[in-house]
Image (tube, rainbow, N blue to C red):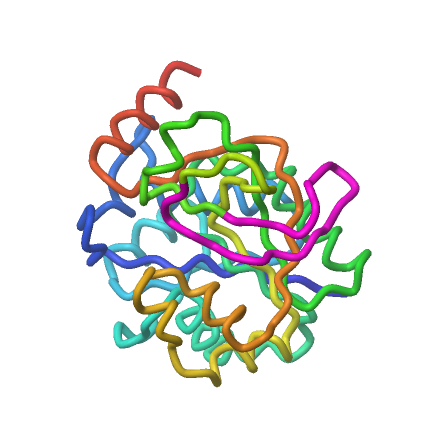
Amino acid sequence: MKTLIIIPSRLSATRLPGKPLLKINGLSIISHVFKKAEEANIGEVFVAAEDNEIIEDVRKNGGQAILRSNKHKSGTDRIYEALKILGKTDINFIVNLQGDEPLMNSADIKNLDNQMKRNNSKLGTLASLLLDKKFCLNENVVKVQTKESLDETKFSEATNFMRKTNDLKGNIYHHLGIYCYDFETLEKFVSYKQSKNEIKNKLEQLRALDNNMTINVALAKTSPLGVDTFEDYIAIKNMMEKK
């Protein structure tokens, strides 16, 4: 079974405009993410960008990138358009990896792909342990609640996603910025209108739950933070440049 990774990226992010091209160790954030995806070695990797500057940067750093529309409401809608542009009809699974996750572990990406194939899942994602209580009320750290507590063997179902919570009990985890769809499920997802929950919380995964789609969750070995704010960028930059 074949997997394709598509990384949606745009310069017009509301909280930190221009963040895909911010540099860490002399390399843009989007190119760091591309290289992490390539290291997973599960299939071809493409960046789907709204801006020519991103495409030029990715290609300059050895990656593949395509231009697509800037009118989509979510990252998954963007990767579906990219998939149609690419015209790849022999793909079984499509990974949507967020372009602001330079700390994403390649082994975790590979594990999600393995779990999808092993369990014949339709839609899956990753979560990690919520290591710090301060993250509970941090809206930029998305949380997921699962039916069962997660371990290395479980691929439990998500029951809810939230931006804030006062509860560290009840199988609450840090949701990571990655999804894996089988082809039919991706087509079904983008055919649905944005749900009220999705719009209110700015979480596209709630569109899936609101339409009774099952999302399986695997436990990641690492707990990477994404770059949502300038403070995140400085913290992650310092972390990566110390290595």
Residue 177 included in the magenta stretch of the image: no
Q: Is residue 147 left or right of residue 166?
A: right
Residue 150 magenta-drawn?
A: yes
Q: Is residue 202 left or right of residue 223?
A: left
Q: Image height check: is 29 above or below 97?
A: above
Q: Is residue 73 left or right of residue 223?
A: left
Point out residue 175 in the picture as x, y percentages from the top left corner: 50, 46
Q: Is residue 163 above or below residue 82?
A: above
Q: Nearer the viewer, residue 57 or 98?
A: 98
Residue at image position (61%, 76%) is 185
Q: Whole-percent x and y of residue 211?
A: 53, 77
Residue at 42%, 42% (x, y): give it.
101
Find residue 22 and report its horizontal and vertical position in percent. Answer: 24, 39
Residue displayed at 50% across by 38% down: 104
Viewer-proximal residue among 177 and 50: 177
Q: Residue at x 41, y 38 (%)?
A: 166
Give the magenta part as a residue range: 144-165
Q: Nearer the viewer, residue 214 or 93?
A: 214
Q: Residue lying farthest right?
A: 118
Which quadrant holds the N terminus?
bottom right
Q: Tell me where residue 94 sits by quadrant.
A: bottom right
- Left or right for 208, reference 113: left
Residue at the top extreme of this rendering: 242
Residue 4, quarter of the rendered image: bottom right
Q: Position of residue 78 (x, y in %)?
A: 40, 70
Image quarter hosting the C terminus: top left
Q: How many marks?
A: 0
Hey, which quadrant is residue 173 in on the image?
Answer: top right
Vertical order, 141 against 208 (above or below)? above
